[in-house]
Image: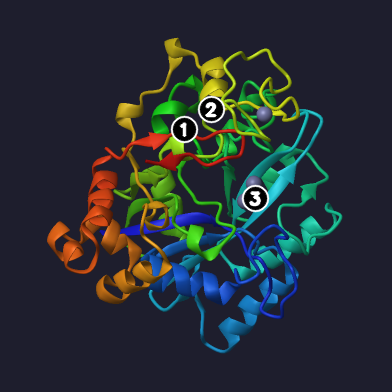
Amino acid sequence: MKRIFADFHIHLGSTSEGKPVKISASKNLTLSNVLHTAFQHKGIQMVGIIDCHVPAVIRELEEAVEKGEISEHRDGGLIKDRGCLIPGSEIEIYDENCNGPIHVLVFLPYLNCMKHFSSWLGERMTNHHLSSQRFYGSATELQEKTKELGGLFIIAHAFTPFKSLYGRGVVKSMEEVFKPELIDAIELGLSCDTHMAGQLGELEKHTFLSNSDAHSLEKIGREYQAIDMEDLSFKELSLALKGKEGRKIVVNYGLHPQLGKYYRTCCAKCGVLIKEEETLKCAHCEKGRIVKGVSNRIKELSDTASASSPEKRPPYTHHVPLEFIPGLGPRMLEKLRRQFGTDMEVIHSVSDEELREILPNQVVDKIIESRNGTIPLKEGGGGHYGKLN
Ligand SMILES: [Zn+2]
Ligand SMILES: [Zn+2]
Ligand SMILES: [Zn+2]
């Protein structure tokens, strides 16, 4: 069995010809840049790119297969160098049951499935050439189509305040919107971890994923997981999500929930912490909208009587991405990668002594503190990241 690192929520900013895909994502987030950064610099072996329903992206992938730069694995997934791309799509659901937008992720094994899915979506979306578009149909219809194509269905960033299943404060149970038996995993999203999500009894049977939702190359691998699998393929991933035949998620890694942008209830404008839940407008700047924190929302939803048991789950390790480490700038990062290969090596394996040979002591101390989970921090909220002190 191999242990690999995987991040299943990465956007594309544009096609190789420069056409926009995800408007809010960085332009240099192209297919080839994503694969190069993830496989060569970050040390991630499996990526889910969730804008693969875009016809121009499918063409790019088909061309790469024709040229022999990418090959299709017979068990699903696309292989480039020593890494594996799982083609996926992020979709916005807004049917009569969900009372507002909810994001989901669909992953499919083969390019021809994605091609079929793309034209099916094209008939049910205003513009399927862009990312995360609204689907005009029911959530369960989308789930059934995914299963018909042999795909995986995942709830995206389940607790974030906008465009999520639980975070918007309208839906209390997944059954109101989805068929739970057709959900393959729940993505925790920013400002949440296994311990927090474990407060919801109805999540007991569901596998948790921790993904970056990267909108820029540097954010790839901000969240990720270690997975045990035999081979890099779609089929192996499906087994791992079910925890079958020894394949499984071994560790979820992610930013401290407190460092995320939505941990505490805060003012969206000035970022001030809101103590009284009932206020609608910020008393500090009198302008900003109040954004309910994930921690507060989970408290409302939690049913400790039937809470699932986080101790039976893979551990969630809080990690600090290298770009968050105070004093570690882009040039130092480049030096580290030249010396040790990938970020995963620096974060997980390189010894203190080796780090001290090329980095200032105070930066190494921060890396060690972040490994041990003892780095002091200021909580984030209202769309503002927390900070390391
Ligand atoms: Zn989303
Ligand atoms: Zn996304
Ligand atoms: Zn304010």
* Residue at 65% across, 64% down: 52
- Alpha-carbon span between mark 1 and mark 2: 7 Å
- Alpha-carbon span between mark 1 and mark 3: 38 Å
For label 2, the residue is: 264
* Residue at 45% across, 35% down: 257
Look at the numbered discs 1 and 2 and tell me whether their residues touch, using CB distance below 8 Å: yes
* Residue at 62% across, 22% down: 173
Q: Is residue 279 above or below residue 377?
A: above
- Considering the image in quadrants, where does the N terminus appear? bottom left
Mark found first going from the N terminus, 2 or 3: 3
Could you say which is closer to the camera, residue 309 or residue 132?
Answer: 132
Q: Is residue 252 above or below residue 112?
A: above
For label 3, the residue is: 146
Residue 4 on image: x %, y %:
33, 59
Task: Give the class, few, some or many, for how many residues have Cα within 10 Å of label 2's Cα (few <14, many ≥20).
Answer: many
- Alpha-carbon span between mark 2 and mark 3: 35 Å
Q: Is residue 380 above or below residue 295?
A: below
Could you say which is closer to the camera, residue 172 or residue 238?
Answer: 172
Q: Is 207 positioned to the left or the right of 335 in the image? A: right
For label 1, the residue is: 379
Q: Is 5 positioned to the left or the right of 52 in the image? A: left
* Residue at 62% across, 26% down: 292
